[in-house]
Amino acid sequence: MEITHIRAGALADPAVDVLLDEIVDFDRRINRALGYGEDFDPLPGSVRSKLVRTDEFTSHEIWLGRVDGRLVAKAGAYLSLQDNTDVADVYAGVLPERRRSGLGTELLTVMERHLGDAGRTRLNAWCEVPAADFDADPRRPRIAAAAGTGSLPAERAEVAFALRRGYGLQQLERCSVANIQDSTPGAQGSSPGSVGSSPGNWATRLGETERSAAGVGDRVGADEGYVIRTWAGPAPHEHVQSIALLRQRMSTDVPGAADLQDEEIWNPARVRALEADREQAGGRTQTALALHDGEGVGFTEVVSYAQRPHVAFQGATLVVREHRGHGLGARLKSSNHAALLEGSEVERVYTWNAAENSWMLAINERAGFEVVGWVGLWKKILA
């Protein structure tokens, strides 16, 4: 197999244009082999951004494996350049018809050697399991997550491959979806598990969630000093510092974060760089920020893309420890989704939550989210 290593920003536009269709087709075939629908198919704008954009904070590298000139395997690494410089978030895939022939092992070995030589010795990876397969035959052997909650079917090809390559299952995340628009069940193009609830039912559930989360007699609002601000696009100048501080807290305060990386360092410039990444990929970010006496104490964001405007993906959500227990998580999400309803074409929102985060999972269930699949987060330390 011929392996080519490409760093973001290293190719001229004509070379990127040649690669783009090939990589998009490869990624689409990998996605469909996993059992997911077109909501998760690759977006050309996002793929192109990974090939061309780099900044002082993050970078992306890929390794392409070809046999007889055809792309049959692909691996990649997301790299932080200002902190966690010994960490790489990695992935690898092989076309279904070329699996079990050693290509995945060959490609992953080359990538790990390159990363290790560059000092990236802590590797984080992930694999995805659709809900139907995750729940099938509970008697079959399973691999438990080190975080203490959840397990994956041991015979799944992705699970067996990760174990053979020395990765340990660290944590599970649940992927869920909610339909926030007035559409019929099973909207065209939706992935397995899509929800068909009307906005009335959805809004009612979200309101019940907020009241339940806050507790009887505990109202969350301006009279407690909490104010919710929402916006679409880049953060307003007066709030960008709050977003930076909350993102830094996000790197340590969410379940399992400390087991995968050290604290990240965020400032307004890094926030603007992330916003520029999303905009170049055709992304639109809808954000809700909770303020208490003018200080940012929680936020949530949802990202959608112009190339698929009916689908959105939940990004970061955090309420700082000192302000939990007031129902802010539910209120932030309800405010942000209400803004989506008013100002976008989004119909479906997907979200990911750690299996041990029972509080947020309960909020999502009351809000109408239904399970689509599970994601295994893996960890390996290179010698």
Image (cartoon, rainbow, N blue to C red):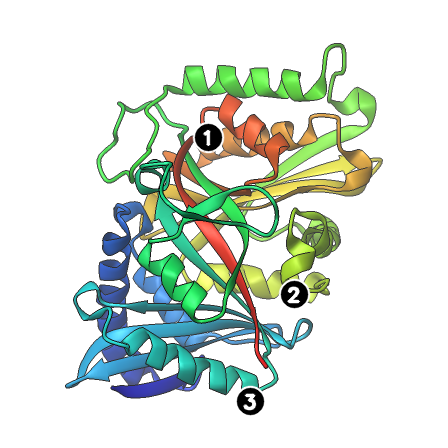
Tell me where residue 61 sits by quadrant. bottom left
Q: Residue at x 19, y 71 (%)?
A: 98
Q: Is residue 119 left or right of residue 283?
A: right
Query: Which is more toward the observer, 356 or 236?
Result: 356
Query: Which is more toward the observer, 148 or 60?
Result: 148
**Residue pointed to by mark 3:** 117
Task: State the CA–CA distance, disc 2 to disc 3.
Answer: 27 Å
Q: Is residue 63 visible?
A: no
For marks 2 and 3 on the same chain, the one whose residue lies earlier in the sequence: 3
Badge 1: residue crowd in 10 Å (few <14, some 14–19, many ≥20): few
For marks 1 and 3 on the same chain, the one whose residue lies earlier in the sequence: 3
Task: State the CA–CA distance, disc 1 to disc 3.
Answer: 50 Å
- Residue 47, horizontal then vertical, whole percent: 36, 66
Query: Compared with residue 154, is residue 360 higher up or lower down, i.e. above or below?
Result: above
- Mark 3 residue element: helix
Badge 3: residue crowd in 10 Å (few <14, some 14–19, many ≥20): few
> Looking at numbered disc 1 in the image, what kind of residue is underneath it?
Glu
Q: Is residue 19 left or right of residue 234?
A: left
- Residue 224, horizontal then vertical, whole percent: 82, 23
Query: Which is more toward the observer, 293 or 302?
Result: 302
Check residue 342 in the rendering and tell me which mark sits there, or answer none: 1
Query: Compared with residue 52, is residue 308 higher up or lower down, i.e. above or below?
Result: above
> Looking at numbered disc 2 in the image, what kind of residue is underneath it?
Arg
Check residue 270 in the rendering and tell me which mark sits there, or answer none: 2
Q: Residue at x 50, y 26 (%)?
A: 365
